Amino acid sequence: MRARRYNLFMQENRSTLPSADRIGVLVASVLLAFALTRLIQFPSLTITLDLPGFYFALPLTLGTFMTILAAALAAAGMDWLTRSHPALKGKTNIEHLMLPTITTFVIGAPLSILPNGTAWWAGFAFGAVLLLVVFLAEYITINPSAPSYALARAGLTALAYALFLILATSLQFSVARMVVAIPAIFIFAGLISLRILHLDGTDRWDFPWAIGIGIICAQMGAGLHYWPLMPVQFGLALTGPLYALTMLSVSLAEDIPLRRAVVGPAIIVSLAWASVIFL
């Protein structure tokens, strides 16, 4: 009897985990795209727009194109990976492609500005771990009855906020112009909050909240863009409100009274901004 239960337990766990060969090929393909940016030398291309009183220049490098290619590989590979899950059963898997694609974009941002050497290889290894975690967690969350579903859901939520922190920090570190940084903050804040809200188990797409959260984060980013903040301070100042507003949306969706619902978000924002002040 014990042997039978053990076999059933192992079969259930195996059904909630992807093939090691498939996930290995997927992670290696995405990482190869990033590695090629350091091996291939290619002249940069600058797109300019010159208007009366306004000049805009957007440099496009090989790293830019390879990051887009890596993100496309991550999305296509995650689609290939999730369609092998027995619990998918013809359902849409669009929600499981979002975070892997965002993760790949966010990994490409710091890798493109890190210098060659130990720092770049450390970032490369850290990116490999992030990719592996997000691919595994997204695969597990396909089946809400999986034994490790709660852990995977919590991991994806934490990873989503960490990705936004990395992105905002990288934008400030690279001294990106406001016309580039603010749309990026709006898009990624909206997509990350949309994915987190969809993880609540109700299978809802809360677009109004996601768009509103993206607009608020973008407005705050515009206001803080020219402040003398360190990159980490800038990232924390934006990640705190993103976390708080997403938490507020979840609380209101659970019919928690507004006075109680705002307490947690207010504490989160206060702690985040206190960290910015005293960092």
Image (tube, rainbow, N blue to C red):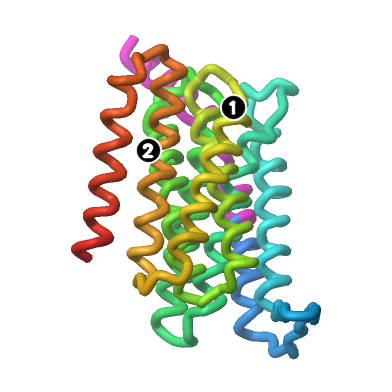
Left or right of 6? Residue 106 is right
Q: Residue furthest top?
A: 1
Q: Amino acid at mark 1?
A: Asp
Is label 1 in contact with label 2 (beta carbons under 8 Å)? no
**Neighbours of disc 1 within 10 Å: few (<14), some (14-19), many (20+):** some
From the image, which quarter does the C terminus lie in? Answer: bottom left
Give the x, y percent position of residue 111: 52, 73
- Which range is magenta? 1-26
Image quadrant assignment for residue 173: bottom left
Q: Is residue 10 magenta?
A: yes
Q: Is residue 30 visible?
A: yes
Q: Which quadrant does the N terminus fall into?
A: top left
253 up-or-down from 84: above or below: above
Image point (60%, 62%), residue name: 28
Q: Which residue is mark 2?
A: 244
Q: Main secondary structure of the magenta part?
A: helix
Residue at numbered disc 1: 206
Number of other residues with Cα within 10 Å of mark 2, as a class: few under 14, some 14 to 19, many 20 or more: many
**Residue 60 visible in the current orientation:** no
Q: Which element carries disc 2, helix, strand or loop?
A: helix
In this rendering, is residue 168 above or below 229?
above
- Taking the magenta stretch, the answer to whether it contains residue 270 is no
* Amino acid, disc 2: Ala
26 left or right of 115 in image: right
Residue occupying image coordinates x 51% and y 68%:
171
Badge count: 2
- Is 92 above or below relative to 133? above
Q: Quadrant of residue 256?
A: top left
Q: Identify whether 94 is placed above or below 102.
A: above
Q: Earlier in the sequence, mark 1 or mark 2?
A: 1
